[in-house]
């Protein structure tokens, strides 16, 4: 029982922390509640990035592309058929008639992203280092180009509007908790352990029989699924999406959240998301003028971007491995073994050998 509690402790603690932050933000004005939903959606995206980048050590600049795929797939499936005929008259017949509830639409959007990730992983997961990063960045540009020009499905640069806004704080929090559990279960799986071994020593892992390309492919597809889920939540939270929403801005924000928190741990992904989101919200409010302890703070325009950049630079200089570091949070109580009463007076199983005594 204790071992099970120790295994579940990190996920339970992270869910508790996120729930407390969401509960506090939900009591604020409507703008703060909107920020809370955005925070929770970003948390799903950052965890999705962590599942691949943090576990494999291979950096990817293209995971946001799966966010776009999940967002468009979910939007098309969640919209009413009559509304699609009006807003997207050129859409293919099958897609124009189908309509799903928010939950299955989000899951299917994640599965579509995972399917694309599986196809992409076949050639891509044999690459490493800068080559892999450039390849994933090229994929991001490819998806962006398709979204800007595939008029029948994405409505080109005009984007898709009229998406049912069904993502509240409670819905986003439930999804974030579920994704934390999924990531925690995967992190303790044999596949993740083998992939972390290859991250630490590629040669030793190969010599031990680890099939690195296959393990990277598993992590890449799971990451694509989670990020696709985040894209579906983003679409249903905003009510409208455009190709520009999935560009470099959100890409580098998600990467910054993971790097600042600590890209090697699930705890780092959660802490980095909360830290940058809350600091960004405070700086954004300070740009518009806000009262703090009786004093009015009015920062110049652009202070939010400058502040977040300074925070990231400071974290990289002072804590290169992130705020949390490279170790996951652990069970706070140390296990101690107490010998049963009937064995306490018994002779030790191994008697120390004295000098000159034959073994």
Image (cartoon, helix red, strand yellow):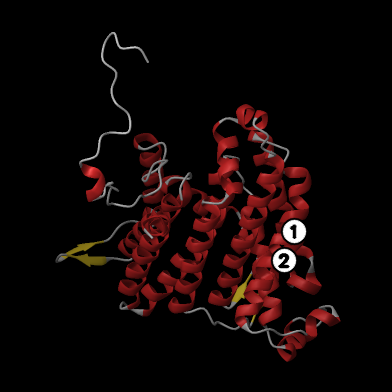
Identify the secondary structure beneath mark 2. helix
Give the left or right position of residue 3, taking residue 113 as reference.
left
Q: Position of residue 145 (x, y in %)?
A: 74, 57
Asked if residue 147 is positioned above or below residue 330 in the image, the reply reads below
Q: Quadrant of residue 346?
A: top left
- Asked if residue 289 lies left or right of residue 58, the reply is left
* Position in image of residue 180 (x %, y %): 48, 62
Would residue 338 be visible to someone looking at this image?
Answer: no
Please name the residue shown 22% across and 43% down the image. 344
Q: Nearer the viewer, residue 9 or 20?
A: 9
Q: Residue at x 60, y 79 (%)?
A: 103
Residue 176, can we see it?
A: yes
Q: CA distance from mark 1 to mark 2?
A: 6 Å
Point out the residue furthest to the top here: 356
User: Which mark identifies residue 116?
Assistant: 1
Which residue sits at x=47%, y=61%?
Answer: 43
Q: Residues within 10 Å of mark 1 (few under 14, many from 20)?
A: some
**Is disc 1 in contact with disc 2, using a CB cutoff of under 8 Å?**
yes
Q: Quadrant of the N terminus?
A: bottom left
Q: Quadrant of residue 200?
A: top right
Please state which of residues 27 and 187 is positioned toward the viewer in this rendering. Answer: 187
Quadrant of the drawing holding the C terminus? top left
Q: Could you say where residue 11 lies in the image, as x and y percent from the top left?
A: 42, 60
Secondary structure at badge 1 equals helix
Q: Label 2 neighbourhood size at 10 Å, few (<14), some (14-19), many (20+)?
A: many
Q: In the rendered image, which residue does mark 2 sit on?
A: 112
Identified at 66% across, 59% down, the residue is 66
Task: Return the residue nearer the eye: 172 or 249.
Answer: 172
């Amino acid at each position: 029982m204790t071992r099970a509690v120790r295994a579940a402790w990190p996920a339970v603690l992270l869910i508790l922390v996120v729930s407390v932050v969401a509960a506090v933000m939900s009591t604020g004005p409507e703008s703060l509640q909107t920020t809370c939903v955005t925070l929770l959606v970003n948390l799903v995206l950052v965890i999705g990035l962590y599942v691949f980048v943090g576990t494999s050590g291979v950096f990817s600049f293209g995971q946001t592309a799966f966010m776009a795929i999940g967002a468009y797939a979910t939007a098309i499936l969640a919209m009413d058929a009559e509304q699609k005929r009006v807003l997207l008259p050129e859409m293919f017949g099958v897609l124009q008639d189908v309509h799903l509830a928010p939950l299955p639409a989000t899951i299917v959007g994640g599965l579509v992203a995972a399917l694309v990730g599986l196809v992409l992983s076949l050639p891509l997961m044999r690459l490493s280092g800068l080559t892999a990063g450039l390849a994933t960045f090229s994929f991001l540009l490819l998806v962006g180009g398709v979204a800007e020009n595939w008029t029948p499905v994405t409505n080109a640069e005009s984007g898709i509007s009229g998406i049912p806004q069904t993502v509240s704080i409670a819905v986003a929090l439930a999804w974030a908790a579920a994704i934390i559990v999924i990531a925690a279960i995967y992190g303790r799986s044999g596949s993740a352990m083998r992939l972390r071994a290859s991250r630490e020593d590629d040669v030793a892992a190969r010599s031990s029989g680890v099939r690195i390309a296959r393990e990277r492919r598993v992590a890449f597809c799971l990451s694509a699924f989670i990020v696709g889920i985040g894209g579906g939540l983003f679409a249903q939270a905003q009510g409208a999406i455009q190709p520009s929403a999935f560009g470099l801005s959100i890409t580098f924000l998600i990467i910054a959240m993971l790097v600042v928190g600590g890209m090697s741990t699930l705890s780092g992904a959660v802490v980095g998301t909360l830290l940058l989101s809350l600091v960004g919200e405070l700086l954004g409010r300070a740009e518009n003028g806000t009262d703090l302890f009786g004093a009015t703070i009015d920062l110049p325009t652009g202070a939010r971007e400058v502040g977040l950049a300074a925070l990231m630079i400071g974290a990289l200089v002072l804590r290169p491995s992130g705020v949390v570091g490279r170790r996951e949070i652990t069970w706070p109580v140390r296990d101690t073994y107490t010998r049963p009463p009937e064995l306490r007076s018994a002779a030790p199983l191994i008697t120390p050998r004295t000098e000159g005594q034959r073994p």
